[in-house]
Image (spheres, rainbow, N blue to C red):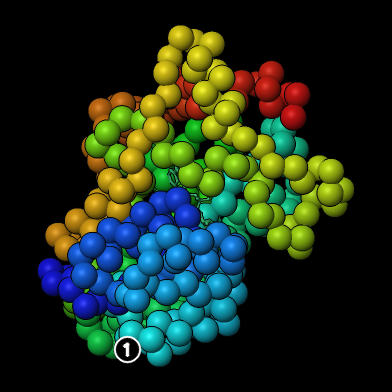
Amino acid sequence: MKDLVGRVAVVTGGGGGIGKAIGEAFLAEGMKVVLADIVEDQLGDAVKDIGSDDVIGVATDVTSVDSLCATRDAAIERFGGVHVIVNNAGVGSGAKGQLWEHHLNDWKWSLDVNVLGVINGMNVFVPALVAQNEGHVVNTSSGNGGYTPMASSGIYPVTKAAVTTLTECLWGQLRESGSNVGASILFPSTRTPGVMATGIWKAGANRPTRYSRGDPSDDQVQDALAGYIARAKAAGEEVPIAPLSEVGELCVEAIRDDVFWATVPMERQNDKLRARTDSQIHRTPPDYLLEPTLMAKSAEEREKD
Ligand SMILES: NC(=O)c1ccc[n+]([C@@H]2O[C@H](COP(=O)([O-])OP(=O)(O)OC[C@H]3O[C@@H](n4cnc5c(N)ncnc54)[C@H](O)[C@@H]3O)[C@@H](O)[C@H]2O)c1
């Protein structure tokens, strides 16, 4: 989609973080924007903060098809149609312990939002995009799982691997069927080095009660960014904060230039991809998973969870 002016975008998880930054980047391109998020207060603040008649907020739960249909209808009512869907809502459950010890509701919550939420977004919006033969789908993945997994964070990369594969298949089917609708996979990343300090680091935040671990005292929020900064500090490293606006720009470029792999190329990531491919081709153990990273909780930290 070369011409974005006047086109309408729905961004899930748009109440903050990367979704809000994508909404702001779309607005700067002259688009109309629907920010869709489950946390209503935060969504209201985001819309107020942006302060434009071309941006509305619609309370949305991506795990519900009915909720997403209502969001689509609200977008059409206000702006007359939809051209871009960004399936960006995501959670980190803050699952405790090792993979085999996680509460099943950590799996269910993560799979429902991060995977089913994207499938629901596709099912609700893509038929109309295909019918009008114009539009673009952006699904937010992560380098963690979308490229190679960080073993210590097992649930999250499982969901992001699914989003990547889903988007590859979507792209393939759109091209095979001759549709003009585009598809991209967004790996949030910035040209400026640093972490994207968003709500996702508050692992377990805003957990709906239906995904409780049973004992409310067990559902506390973990500040994963604080843990990372502490580990980095102990190793004598600074953790700069990157501007989220650069992720918004990446998303705009992906749509305008029809880029499938929407990411800032990083040599370290490329090395891992090569190591993974080599391991698969040569059937050697996936040793690249054992590389230490300050982002990951240590085995002792997981033990203490
Ligand atoms: N921040 C990073 O470093 C990073 C890196 C790679 C990928 N991502 C991905 O980027 C996306 C955006 O995350 P973020 O980093 O901006 O974190 P964030 O927590 O600030 O944003 C995620 C948003 O999704 C919303 N959400 C959660 N459950 C929902 C539901 N059921 N329905 C609708 N909205 C829901 C949250 O309320 C929140 O506003 C996520 O998919 C995340 O996995 C983030």
Visible in this render: residue 117?
Answer: no
Callout 1: SS: loop
Q: Residue at label 1? A: 80
Q: Position of residue 206 (x, y in %)?
A: 66, 54
- Residue 43 percent location from the top left of the image: 52, 64
Q: Name above or below for residue 301 compared with residue 134.
A: above
Which residue is located at x 57 percent, y 51 percent? 91
What percent of the width, then of the height, locates residue 256? 17, 63
Q: Is residue 84 left or right of residue 68?
A: left
Whether residue 112 can be seen here: yes
247 left or right of 153 in image? left
What residue sits 66% from the left and 46% below the top? Answer: 204
Q: Quadrant of the N terminus?
A: bottom left
Residue density around tag 1, few if under 14, some if 14–19, many if 20 or more, within 10 Å: few
Foreground residue among 15 and 132: 15
Of the 4 image quadrants, the one containing the C terminus is: top right
Is 31 drawn above or below residue 152 in the view shown?
below
Say which quarter of the image contains residue 65: bottom right
Residue 194 point in image, percent of width and height: 36, 31
Q: Is residue 295 above or below residue 264?
A: above
> For residue 266, which quarter of the picture?
top left
